[in-house]
Each structure stands twice: as structure tokens, then as C-alpha cells.
Amino acid sequence: MQKLLILLFIFLGFEGFAQKQTKNFVEKNLNIIRSIDPDSTDFTDVEVIGNAIGNSRIVMLGEQDHGDAPTFLAKTRLIKYLHEKKGFNVLAFESDFFALNEGWDHLDKQKTTINNFIQQNIFSIWTSCTQCENLFYNYVSESFGTNNPITISGFDSQFDGGYSNNLKKYIDDFFKVNDIPFIKSKSYIDNFLPFIDSIKISKDVAKQTLFIKQIDTIFKQISKKWEGSFELLVLHNLQESSKNGISFLTKAKDYKELRDKQMAENLKWLVNQKFPNQKIIVWAHSAHILKNREFIKSKSSNENWTNMGHFFTRDSLLNQQTYIVGFSSKYGTAGRITIPNTYKVVLPIKNSFEDWMNDNIKYAFVDFKRFRNLNPNSFEYFNMKGKYHIYNEAVWTQVFDGIFYIKDMYPCEKSVLKF
């Protein structure tokens, strides 16, 4: 018994030391960011982020909720810096994989057509937010008047973009060119093709199940030369979308995980197949991009799901090439333009990451990857609002590579721009 007490004392003492170690690192390696204004083009203050990113080819930028106005401003400024100073020229969104690849690739790259396409195919939580206007409706389109244009892409398995109205014809044309036997069946005409138009809204589990089986039949009939192609990946997205729909309708536990696993596959394809020699910025919710989720203590079973970042970084090479930036805020209000009500962010609790921040600091950055390199044996749990605007206890230094701190949060203003 005495030995157990001694071991417990040693363990608790080690935990306390580790926490002190992390806190000391944060306080001594806190990099003040001067501004989040997208028009602030003196990037000397954000060079610390560039140095932290180093030679990473993929940079993921998170957000605690899909309406965090100052986070969107900060991300816009970071995107400009990464584009102009670090050679990143692909911007991939948590939005329609099919629309933002097939549609973008065939788009006439003029300012009006670009702005209209963005507004119709990237989720309105961003495109209808005033704080995103600078990026979407000025910077991207104006880059096509330079020698360094920005390519827009997407990796979400949901077919929510306006361009996806072309999906049924796209699929049908692909099957006809390849003379797929299934297209000659009555089931193809009566069930398969019509269902593509209703896949987003269908609440019929039987039809979803049939659709999944039909795609399996099609996979067996397609030539192996198409393996790894965009066309087959679109079919996988259709199939996983139906699986996701069934999971949601039946209240299964894998509802979120199905989507995230496919998003990871889509992002891998973008990185390895479509843009193998380019640097990519990923824009998504922090809950999708974080890694090593096993280091987060979940407060409910709803949080205990395997996410895109976890699937993506299981590939050791991709993990080495990726730098993941989370966001944290201390005070304020949050909400989305698609939801009428706003809410107060959780106030800082004692000895949390946000509590370590002096109130005179508005914006700052901490490089957790550097902490890991300096302290490879440190796995300390501490509280931080890294996943949402609520606290989770986690080894946050293993979950994100860096944290962008914002003192005051406020929700988006609704944009009135129409194209």
C-alpha cells in the first residue's frame, strides 16, 4: 500500500511538472500577431507562422464554429501570406468535392463568373459572411490577373454545390462512353438515375440501400484502367453519401465518421493525384482537421468519432508534410448566419490555455510542433477551447501543430452581395 502511495505521489508530481512545462513554454514562446485585417500586407508578424510551417506542403486552417468572424479574417490574412510568400496556390474547402473540382476546372476564369461560382458552390456559412468577402470576391478572382492564380478545390463528400445539378448527366455520360452493361437495365433508368437528383434529401432507407448495391454492381463492370480516377472517386462519394444518409436516418453511431473518412480519401486524392507538386491550404472546421483524437477526453459519446484529420495523418508521409493550425478564443459571442440565435463562448477556466493569456494580448500564435520537438516525452493534458467554443481536456500539443489565439470572438455579419 505504501509503495502504491509513493508511485501515485510520483505520478502526480510528474503531471504537475509537465503542466508547468507546457505553461512555461506557452508563456515564453508566445508570438504576438499584430493584426487580423486582411488588408494588412506587412507580413512580418506572421512570419513566425511561416517559419513554424517550414517546408510543409499542406496547411490546414481550422475554426471553432462555422461563423467565427475574426477567425475568418485571420484565415484570409494567412492565406494571402501563404500564397504570396510561401508558394501555396491551391485552396481546398470543406465543400462539394465534385462541384469544386469538375466545375472549377471548366469555369471561365473571369471575375464575375468566379464570384458567382464561389457563391453557388462553397457553403453559404462562409460565402454569405461579410468577413469572407475580401477573400472570395476580391482576392481569388483578382489573382487571375497575376502570374500566380489561386486554384479553388473542395473535398466534402456532400453534393451541395449548385454545379452538382450536372452530376446525373456527368455520371450517365461516363457510363455510356464506357459501355457499362448496367445502364441497359430497367433499374438504371427507373431507379438509379432519378435517385441521383434526390440523394441529398431522400429519407427512404430502402432506396438508399438499393443505390449502394447498384454502385457495387457498376464497380464490377468498370475497367480497371479507371482505378484512382476522379470519376470513380465521385462514385465512391455517391455511395458513401447514401451510407451516411442511412446512418443519419437510423441514428447510427458512425454518421459523422462516414463523412470524415471519405473527406480524407478525397483530400488524399487532391494531394497525391490532382496536385502532386503544389502546396495546398485546407479550410475546414477544427473538429475535422485535428489529429490524434485519442488524446482528447470526450465529454459525450457524440464527440467520440474518428475525423478526417485522424484518417489523413495515419499516412506517415502525409503527416510529415502537413501542418495543422487550430484556433482558440477567450471571450465573446459565436453563432452562424444560417442559425438565428447566437451564444456566449465559454469563459476561461483556471489554468487553461486561454487563462494563460494576458488580457492585453489580442492575437497570438504558439507553435506546438516546436514544443513536441523540444519535449518529446511530454504528454500533458490541459484544458483549451480548441475543438469548439467549449473546453476539452486533451494533450493539445499532439492534436494541433500550432494555435492561433484570438481574444474576442464575434459572429459573422450576413453579406448582401449577389452575383
Image (cartoon, rainbow, N blue to C red):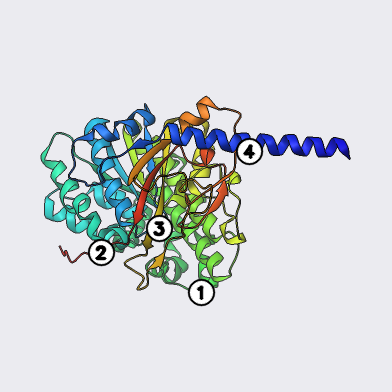
Which one is in front, 105 or 212? Answer: 105
Query: In terms of secondary structure, where does tag 1 sit?
Result: loop
| Amino acid type, label 2 | Glu
Give how far apart the Cα atoms at labels 1 and 4 are.
54 Å
Q: What residue is drawn where x is 20% and y is 55%? A: 133
Query: Dots 3 and 2: beta carbons under 8 Å?
Result: no
Q: Nearer the viewer, mark 3 or mark 1?
A: 3
Residue positioned most to the right: 1
The residue pinned by badge 3 equals 65
The local crowd at label 2, few if under 14, some if 14 to 19, many if 20 or more residues have their Cα within 10 Å, is: some
Which one is in front, 15 or 193? Answer: 15
- In the figure, is residue 369 to the left or right of 301? left
Query: Dots 3 and 1: beta carbons under 8 Å?
Result: no
Whether residue 317 is visible, yes or no, is no
Whether residue 262 is visible, yes or no, is yes
Query: In terms of secondary structure, where does tag 3 sit?
Result: loop
The residue pinned by badge 4 equals 16
Image coordinates of residue 375 in percent, x first then y, are 55, 27
Q: What residue is drawn where x is 36% and y is 70%? A: 339
- In the figure, is residue 13 to the left or right of 92? right
The quadrant where residue 51 appears: top left
| Amino acid type, label 1 | Asp
Query: In terms of secondary structure, where does tag 2 sit?
Result: loop
